[in-house]
Image: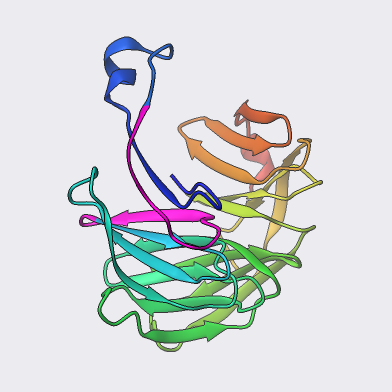
Amino acid sequence: IADGPGGLKIADLSPLWDEGSNAEVEIVGSWDTDGNARSVAYSNGLVYVADGNRGIKVVDVTDPIRPFEVGSTRTEYATSIKVAGDYIYLADGDGGFRIYDSDPDVLALLAVVDTANTRGVAVVGDTAYIVGSTGMTIVDITSRENPVEIGAYRTGYAEEVFVEGRLAFVAEGFSGLTIIDVADPTDLYTVSKNDNKYAVGIAVSGKYAYVVDANGLNVIEILIPSWSLRD
């Protein structure tokens, strides 16, 4: 769990499976990241933390009761982080979109794409979807050292993005949830919007979107008529 100034928290969720939603979740481990933990990603026993102005912190959680830091690197303002294979994909505020080597002993910066006040990132295969103050940028990351912008779409101040199939779900702050068809990165368009009170987080599973806004968690059924999608 990214716990802001509280750093990294590790929770035991097993009671939920046994006792249901009334179960008490226990925090079994924690690590003071010394920054403002905004986002986490897990890979092979390591948790990568987007730690605000402290950059990226890498914490070994093989023993969740006794986590310890194994690597770090300073960045502009790390807000959202994804890890896939050998690479870290970072939304870094005014530092743009950044790609790093995920080896905690190295954490080498491989590439930077200049995106405005970058807040959120999603990665699907060799494509990255980045959102921030000017909307969404789509980047071909086939070459991690030489990413290429292949599409952009103007929205309001976007906080986070989740991509499922041909649709990008954008938590667009005061504008709520915006769903964009990204099948053709050169021809992006909005297919649906939902009013939420300052949407900041988004996840999708099946036919439901889970949106975090100023009122808490909202569960929204996704109903996209086929005629609203271009061939």
From the viewer's side, name the closer residue of 34 and 54: 34
Report x, y in % for residue 4: 55, 51
203, above or below 52, in the image: above
Left or right, 114 with reference to 106: right
Toward which corner of the image does residue 143 lie, by quadrant?
A: bottom left
Q: Quadrant of the N terminus?
A: top left
Q: Report if residue 161 is visible in the image.
A: yes
197, above or below 167, in the image: above
Left or right, 193 with reference to 44: right
Left or right, 213 with reference to 1: right
Q: Residue at x 27, y 72 (%)?
A: 86
Left or right, 211 with reference to 23: right
Q: Residue at x 53, y 60 (%)?
A: 80
228, above or below 21, in the image: below
Q: Residue at x 54, y 67 (%)?
A: 78
User: Magenta residues?
Assistant: 26-45
Q: Report if residue 231 is visible in the image.
A: no
Toward which corner of the image does residue 45 lie, by quadrant?
A: bottom left
Q: Is residue 30 magenta?
A: yes
80, above or below 140, in the image: above
Toward which corner of the image does residue 11 lie, by quadrant?
A: top left
Report x, y in % for residue 111: 46, 86
Which color scheme did the rendering employ for the protein?
rainbow
Q: Residue at x 66, y 55 (%)?
A: 159
From the viewer's side, name the closer residue of 89 and 33: 33
Q: Number of callouts in the render?
A: 0
Question: Residue most toward the left?
Answer: 63
Q: Is residue 152 magenta?
A: no
Report x, y in % for residue 179: 66, 46
Report x, y in % for residue 204: 50, 38
